[in-house]
Image (cartoon, helix red, strand yellow):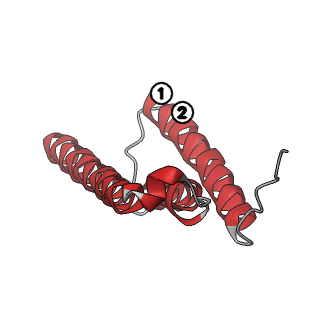
Amino acid sequence: MVTLMRLAPYRRHLIITEFVALAALIGSMYLFAQMAKQGEVVSPGLWLIPIISSFLVISGFCGNLYIRWVESIGQTEEQASGGKPVQRVFIYLLIASLYIIWFMAVVQAWSSHQALSASS
């Protein structure tokens, strides 16, 4: 017998947020490429678009990951033997590492932008 998994009510909102933010991120990268072709310097205010968009993409992904692997797990034999706490720790570490990598990438991009602005 196949049982249908009931989705969390906010999962749809997470998916919509994730993909709208992804479209904004791709659009901002296209805008930055066009500005670079014209020799224009990207203002610091425009950097907020890809920073916020990438944060929302990662947040939507992490939210859906959490829902899929922690919140929506049915009762299985692995859970009865203690599989769920290990799975929770793994997911939390994965989510924390994604945010740390995102933060390091933002800092690296910002510092390279500042170095380019200073040399111009």
Are the residues at dot 2 and dot 1 in contact (C-beta closer than 8 Å)? Answer: yes
Q: Is residue 9 visible?
A: yes
Residue farthest to the bottom? 9
Badge 2 element: helix
Between 54 and 76, which is closer to the camera in this rendering? 76
Which residue corresponds to mark 2?
34
Q: Amino acid at mark 2?
A: Gln
Q: Position of residue 118 (x, y in %)?
A: 15, 47
Label 1 crowding class (10 Å Cα cut-off): few <14, some 14-19, many 20+?
A: few
The picture quadrant where one finds residue 30 is top right
Which residue corresponds to mark 1?
37
Residue appearing at x 40%, y 48% in the figure = 42
Q: Position of residue 92 (x, y in %)?
A: 34, 60
Badge 1 element: helix
Q: Quadrant of the C terminus?
A: top left
Residue appearing at x 76%, y 56% in the figure = 5
Between 69 and 20, which is closer to the camera in this rendering? 69
Q: Amino acid at mark 1?
A: Lys
Residue appearing at x 49%, y 32% in the figure = 33
